[in-house]
Amino acid sequence: MRGEAVLLGGKTIEDMMDVIGHMKGKILVMGAFPKPAGDRKAYRENMRKLFGAIQTEGIAAFLVASEKENGFMNMTGSPIAGRFRFFPDAPTAFLNKEHATMLKRMLEKHGKVDLELNLGGTLSEKPVQAFNSIGEIRGSEKPDEVVILGAHLDSWDLGTGATDNGTGSVASLEALRAIQASGVKPKRTIRVVLFSGEEQGIFGSKAYVKAHAGELKAIQAVLIDDLGTGKLRGFAMEGREDLRPFMAEAIAPLNEMGVRELPLESSEDSDHAPFVEAGVPAFFGIQDNEDYFTATHHSQADTFEHVKPEALVEGATAMAVTALGLADMAPRLPHKTVEKIEKIEKTEKNAPAAH
């Protein structure tokens, strides 16, 4: 195909809105997003308007710039998947950052640039069936109450998914193995869930929450390990200040290892999100960045050579000790009241089954 390039980018979301009404038949090139400043509600509303227009104006193609340097590529999302729903129903591909910035310079200099694209790739005839993988140690006193350790098995095919999320999967499995080998008998059940379809739209965890809606109140807590190979420093509290005393107690034995951080920050970018939305206490592991977002994350560099063995061992230790602390804790962690579980986004037709 051939078409005129239109750059989607700017210092503010208002700058980006200027393309509305001028995209039909164009090849839209998406640059970096400005971070929300001031009124976050207005920012989100403008984002909805912008991507609603992208969906309806009839663009010819959609190109996304990688945020990584030195030719590292990036992959993410799906046109039909929840958190990546802004991807339009149009031919879509990624550009490396250097090519995208060159294109921007050409547009600034000449005002108009025509692109010719030849994109490969195929779609399967049917949705792909995927499965969550589950293992557990039954609780000695309260087996129906559960602490979940989680990670995701799927990855992008540019690399082997070593740090996203091989490391989280291995740390979760090793935590369970270490607890079993130690002979300790946790009072509550400790369950490892390796979710599928996380990269396409957190499908596996959505399916799990939907399938187990009647059992969510029995979940003591959920711990997710999905931030690469760096040293684990603590857990994000997902805005739940009321849960700080419980988590502080659970990680207290790990403080001398440097596991101390309990920031209030929240995100919707991994398998904890459907649990949080359902009111379940769920926490996302905070780790040293290492070269995760600058290189390995969703890129051709996500290979075993980037795994830090010593950090992986410490991460498994931290997951195991935190899980045991929560499993043996006398009080139950308070859940938020959620009026309707249906609030959780309905799982798309190609989501993995919750097995």
Image: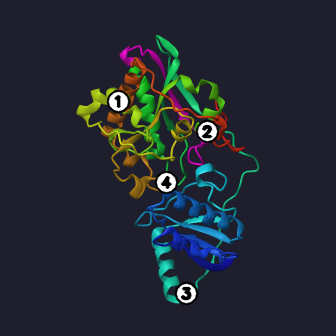
- Identify the secondary structure beneath mark 4: loop
x, y percentage for residue 354? 64, 32
Q: Nearer the viewer, mark 2 or mark 1?
A: 1
The residue identified by callout 2 is: 206
The residue identified by callout 4 is: 298
Q: CA distance from mark 2 to mark 1?
A: 28 Å
Q: Label 1 amino acid?
A: Pro
Q: Label 2 amino acid?
A: Lys
Q: CA distance from mark 4 to mark 3?
A: 32 Å
The residue identified by callout 1 is: 245
Quadrant containing the N terminus in the rendered view = bottom right
Q: Nearer the viewer, mark 2 or mark 4?
A: 2
The residue identified by callout 3 is: 111
Of residues 243 and 99, the one drawn nearer to the viewer in this rendering: 243
Of residues 186 and 306, the one drawn nearer to the viewer in this rendering: 186
Q: CA distance from mark 2 to mark 3?
A: 45 Å
At x 42% / y 45%, what residue is drawn? 227
Q: Label 4 amino acid?
A: His
- Which segment did they paint magenta? 180-204
Sequence order check: which comes first, mark 1 or mark 4? 1
Residue at the farthest left position = 256
Kindly indicate whether the residue at mark 4 contacts the one at mark 1 (C-beta within 8 angstroms). no
Instruction: Give the class, few, some or many, for how many residues have Cα within 10 Å of label 3's Cα (few <14, many ≥20).
Output: few
Sequence order check: which comes first, mark 2 or mark 4? 2
Residue at the farthest bottom position = 110
- Identify the secondary structure beneath mark 2: helix
Q: Label 3 amino acid?
A: Gly
Q: Nearer the viewer, mark 3 or mark 1?
A: 1
